Image (spheres, helix red, strand yellow):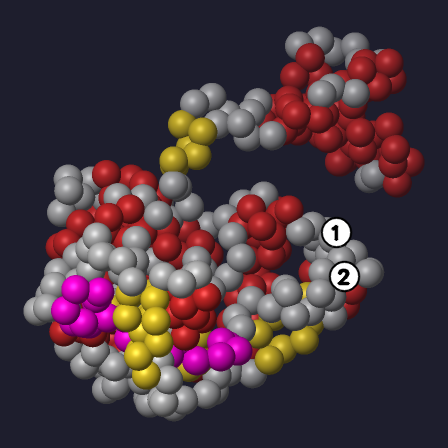
């Protein structure tokens, strides 16, 4: 079972020279000790501006905030409850309430009680049974609905971890990672509950590491780095280094060791293309637009490249993830009629 680790950002900033946290910010990260260490490493990589494939491969994009969100939160005071990386569900996921068709009263689907009452309160449905799981009957003809042969959609689902069976500290787990789902056609992912299951915190951490391994394999197969591919002309690294060197010399010249200062001046001379460099030249160089070191190249996400290379075989890709889920976690409490070959 995972442990909740409260990490004081001030101490972390001193220990890691982390510029992403301020003395008024406290980061609360609900992860295992191993996960917490990896988060520290990831945050340090973000500060350095470099993220390795291994670092990004580990990140479960359904569990942790995106890299963009971490950058946006830099220096911002956040609530411990709102900033928790992994949170258990506060209420059961499955209410197992049944919706019946207007015409013949056949079951259409199972939804939450809250959704059922939405129909009832708008006089779009009437309550048939309120003893136990709610049953309502629509007052209008439904345009769609599952086939009568779709036993999974109409089956009763337990609120328990599909791997170990515990019924507490549960959260949703997505069998197909979000980075791929968001690139698929909406028809492949919208209103599809088959590939969303419940896992306890400990089992969810195991799945996070397991699906990171498969993502790394897929990245190698598709020649698509997990952190995406940038296209276009990048920033002038020489200009960036020259600007930073000029700023350092202007501010801390008397504290910089002479060999290091000479090396910095040599870099600036090479960048400017002349041997005579004055303080005015350093000041002008230091005032260069701050955007000079911003990488404005277009980032093509890893998931988009992979999905485009599927050539429409979305079903086969999803089945691969389902099989990986079964092989790695060996779940013993999957919902009735759940299947690797369930149709999309």
Residue 23: x and y in percent read 82, 60
Q: Mark 2 = which residue?
A: 25
Examine the rendered structure and indicate whether residue 331 appears above or below residue 302: below
Q: Characterize the local packing of mark 2: few (<14), some (14-19) or many (20 or more) Cα atoms within 10 angstroms.
A: some
Disc 1 crowd, CA 10 A, few/some/many (<14, 14-19, 20+): some
Q: Nearer the viewer, residue 103 or 271?
A: 103
Image point 15% across, 54% down: which residue? 315
Nearer the observer, 101 or 27: 101
- The circle drawn on residue 103 is none
N-terminal-most mark, 1 or 2 = 2
Q: Position of residue 273 (x, y in %)?
A: 66, 10
**Residue labelled with disc 1:** 75
Looking at the picture, how far across and down is residue 294, in whole percent? Answer: 60, 30
Disc 1 to disc 2, how far (Cα)? 7 Å
Q: Does residue 273 show up magenta in the picture?
A: no
Q: Circle 2 sits in a helix, a strand or a loop, which is it? A: loop
| Residue at the image point whose x is 64% and y is 46% from the top | 72
Q: Nearer the viewer, residue 252 or 288?
A: 288
Secondary-structure class at tag 1:
loop
**Relative horizontal placement of residue 296, taking residue 78 as reference (left or right):** left
- Is there CB contact under 8 Å for labels 1 and 2? yes
**Identity of the residue drawn at 31% across and 73% down:** 136
Question: In this image, 126 relative to 65: left or right?
Answer: left
| Residue in view at x 34 percent, y 71 percent | 126
Task: Please provide the residue range marked out in magenta.
Answer: 88-108
* 95 is within the stretch colored magenta: yes
Query: Quadrant location of the C terminus?
Result: bottom left
> In the depicted view, which residue is nearer to us: 127 or 48?
127
- Left or right: 15 as drawn, with respect to 316: right
User: Is there any visible trace of residue 15 in the rendered image?
Assistant: no
């Amino acid at each position: 079972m995972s442990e909740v680790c409260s990490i004081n950002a001030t101490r972390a900033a001193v220990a890691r020279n982390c510029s992403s946290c301020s003395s008024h910010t406290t980061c609360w990260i609900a992860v295992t000790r191993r996960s917490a260490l990896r988060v520290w490493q990831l945050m340090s990589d973000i500060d350095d501006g470099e993220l390795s494939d291994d670092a990004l491969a580990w990140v479960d994009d359904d569990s942790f905030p995106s890299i963009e969100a971490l950058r946006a939160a830099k220096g911002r005071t956040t609530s411990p409850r709102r900033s928790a990386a992994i949170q258990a569900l506060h209420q059961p996921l499955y209410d197992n309430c049944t919706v019946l068709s207007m015409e013949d009263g056949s079951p259409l689907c199972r939804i939450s009680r809250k959704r059922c009452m939405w129909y009832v309160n708008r006089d779009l449905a009437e309550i048939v049974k309120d003893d136990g799981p709610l049953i309502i009957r629509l007052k209008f003809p439904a345009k769609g609905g599952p086939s009568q042969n779709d036993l999974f959609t109409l089956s009763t689902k337990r609120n328990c971890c599909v791997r170990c069976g515990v019924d507490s500290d549960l959260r949703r787990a997505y069998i197909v990672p979000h980075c791929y789902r968001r690139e698929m056609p909406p028809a492949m992912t919208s209103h599809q509950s088959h590939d969303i299951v419940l896992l306890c915190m400990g089992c969810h951490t195991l799945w996070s590491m397991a699906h990171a391994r498969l993502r790394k394999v897929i990245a190698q197969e598709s020649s698509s780095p997990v952190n995406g591919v940038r296209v276009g002309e990048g920033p002038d690294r020489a200009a960036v280094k020259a600007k930073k060197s000029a700023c350092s010399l202007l501010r801390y010249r008397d504290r910089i060791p002479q060999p290091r200062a000479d090396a910095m001046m040599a870099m600036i001379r090479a960048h400017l293309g002349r041997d005579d460099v004055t303080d005015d030249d350093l000041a002008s160089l230091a005032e260069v637009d701050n955007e000079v070191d911003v990488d404005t190249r277009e980032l093509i996400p890893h998931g988009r490249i992979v999905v485009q290379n599927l050539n429409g075989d979305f079903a086969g890709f999803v089945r691969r993830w389902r099989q990986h889920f079964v092989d790695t976690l060996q779940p013993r409490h999957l919902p009735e009629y759940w299947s690797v070959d369930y149709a999309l």
